[in-house]
Image (cartoon, rainbow, N blue to C red):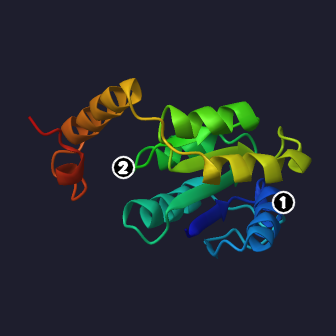
């Protein structure tokens, strides 16, 4: 497994904690930035980099950090094939994977206790998609993406098979 990491300045501290967790777990990662917490940057740039890495197979999962996690998730979900979930605790991390097959986790570094990050990250990276009734729902999401992005290169991967 390889993980793509990204943050804006507000999420920088969370990203740095995530790197420590991934190092401890022996999971390779690529850090797409930001490079510090003091220089303001635009979160969509990092959401795009991480989301693109995930959908192209450069990374298996993505971890995004901003102030609330909301902006990162909105931006990342504009990329066809990304299923980014804002996660607040271990339960939402588990459900994001089990029910939604989320491939990107967005966390608010300003509203999430950073001491919780090891548990959130480990949960998100180890939980499997449950399949079953959830597969039908993901197929419907893929159909929505394909209809919304008919000329996007990822659309052929998203289209439902009859």
Frontmost residue, 100 versus 44: 100
Of discs 1 and 2, which sits in the foreground? 2
- Circle 2 SS class: loop
Which residue corresponds to the image point at 35% horizontal and 33% vertical from the top-left?
138
Q: How much space separates mark 1 and mark 2, taking CA atoms?
A: 27 Å
- Circle 1 SS class: helix
Image coordinates for residue 160, horizontal then vertical, percent = 17, 38
Question: Mark 1 vs mark 2: which is more N-terminal?
Answer: 1
Q: Residue furthest left?
A: 162
Does any portion of residue 128 appear in the rendered image? yes
Frontmost residue, 146 versus 89: 89
Marks 1 and 2 in Cβ contact (< 8 Å): no
Image coordinates for residue 99, horizontal then vertical, percent = 50, 31
Q: Dot 2 corresponds to which residue?
A: 81
Say which quarter of the image contains residue 154. bottom left
Neighbours of disc 2 within 10 Å: few (<14), some (14-19), many (20+): many
Say which quarter of the image contains residue 55. bottom left
From the image, which quarter does the N terminus lie in? bottom right
In the image: residue 116, left or right of residue 158:
right
Frontmost residue, 83 versus 135: 135
Q: Is residue 105 above or below residue 38?
A: above
Neighbours of disc 1 within 10 Å: few (<14), some (14-19), many (20+): some
Which residue corresponds to the image point at 73% horizontal and 67% vertical from the top-left?
22
In the image: residue 132, left or right of residue 150:
right
Q: Is residue 89 above or below residue 57?
A: above
Frontmost residue, 11 versus 97: 97
Does any portion of residue 66 appear in the rendered image? no
Which residue corresponds to the image point at 57% horizontal and 36% vertical from the top-left?
96
Q: Is residue 49 above or below residue 102?
A: below
Q: Residue furthest top?
A: 133
Say which quarter of the image contains residue 30. bottom right
Q: Dot 1 corresponds to which residue?
A: 13
């Amino acid at each position: 497994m390889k993980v793509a990491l990204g943050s804006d300045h507000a999420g920088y501290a969370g990203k740095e904690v995530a790197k420590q967790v991934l190092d401890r777990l022996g999971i390779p990662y690529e850090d797409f930035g930001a490079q510090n917490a003091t220089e303001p940057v635009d979160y969509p740039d990092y959401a795009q980099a991480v989301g693109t890495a995930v959908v192209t197979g450069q990374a298996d999962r993505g971890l995004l950090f901003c102030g609330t996690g909301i902006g990162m998730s909105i931006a990342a979900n504009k990329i066809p094939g990304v299923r980014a979930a804002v996660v607040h605790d271990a339960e939402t991390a588990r459900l994001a994977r089990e029910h939604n097959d989320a491939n990107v986790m967005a966390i608010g570094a300003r509203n999430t206790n950073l001491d919780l990050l090891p548990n959130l990250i480990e949960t998100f990276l180890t939980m499997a998609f449950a399949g079953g009734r959830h597969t039908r729902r993901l197929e419907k999401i893929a159909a929505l993406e394909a209809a919304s992005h008919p000329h996007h290169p990822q659309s052929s991967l998203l289209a439902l098979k009859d």
